[in-house]
Amino acid sequence: MAYPKGINKAHDSFSLFLNIPDNESLPTGWRRHAKVSFSLVNQGSEKLSQRKVTQHWFVQKAFTWGFPVMITHTELNAKKGFLVNGELKVAAKIEVLEVVGKLDVSEESSPIMKTIDVNGFQVLPSQVDSVKRLFEKNLDIVSKFRLKNPYLKTACMNLLLSLTETLCQSPQELSNDGLSHAGVALAYLIETGLKLDWLEKKLDELKGKKKKEESCLVRLREMDEQLQPFKKRCLDIEDQISKEKEELLAAREPLSLYDDIDNNV
């Protein structure tokens, strides 16, 4: 999904998102963890092309993720090789990292999706509960929302749902890049007038937990390295114990006088 004028006029940028089509027909529990790479191809020199990468869990109810600011209009129109004869080339690479749930979409399913109005936002039936919960818990979320264009409003809501889904993941599932992109998306949504201070606190809390997770992992690695010589020493001692036990059993075996007599005969 490309927005040449951006999803927020105040930001003066070209916005680019990955959107899962026909998400309404996806089975319950469907999830895809994907690495998404968008490149704006420089038609003068490929070395000057701009590339942005993010990772995200795409789910049925939050199926859009990307970059509100892929490139600014100022840079795009600066005759640097991105926009040539009115043409902008975009390259996309998608790598599926993890798969949850089978893709079981009926071939007869209609591509035309009905939408439902929730507080002035046109959303898909599968999104209704999530959007209603957002408004129930945050009554003034759109009190200063400035966008009037229905398509841009839908894009903002999809991005917000994807963002809330992202911030509900465990720190283990999120990369630092993912958190960084989440911060950019949050800042962009706030610029549209959405009141998301509660989501800012959630993001800060998640960043803190991510830092704590990383520091714990570092300490665990350090302790494991310190433990390795002792583990090796223990294995050596266990090996020595096994040998000593074998010798002990041999020493405890009774002698047979008759064996010696038989041998002499």
Image (cartoon, rainbow, N blue to C red):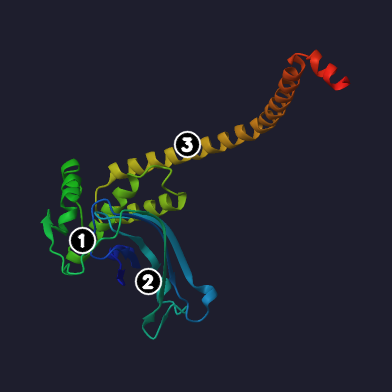
CA gap between label 1 and label 3 equals 39 Å
- Label 1 sits on what residue type? Ser
Residue that protrudes farthest toward the front in the picture: 265
Q: Contact, CB < 8 Å: mark 1 with mark 3?
A: no
**Residue 176 shows in this picture:** yes
Q: Earlier in the sequence, mark 2 or mark 1?
A: 1
Q: Residue at x 42, y 52 (%)?
A: 178
- Picture quadrant where residue 127 is located: bottom left
CA gap between label 2 and label 1 equals 36 Å
Q: Position of residue 113 (x, y in %)?
A: 16, 65
Q: Contact, CB < 8 Å: mark 2 with mark 3?
A: no
CA gap between label 2 and label 3 equals 39 Å
Q: Is residue 100 above or below residue 67?
A: above
Residue holding disc 2? 73
- Label 3 sits on what residue type? Lys
Residue holding disc 1? 25
Q: Which mark is residue 212?
A: 3
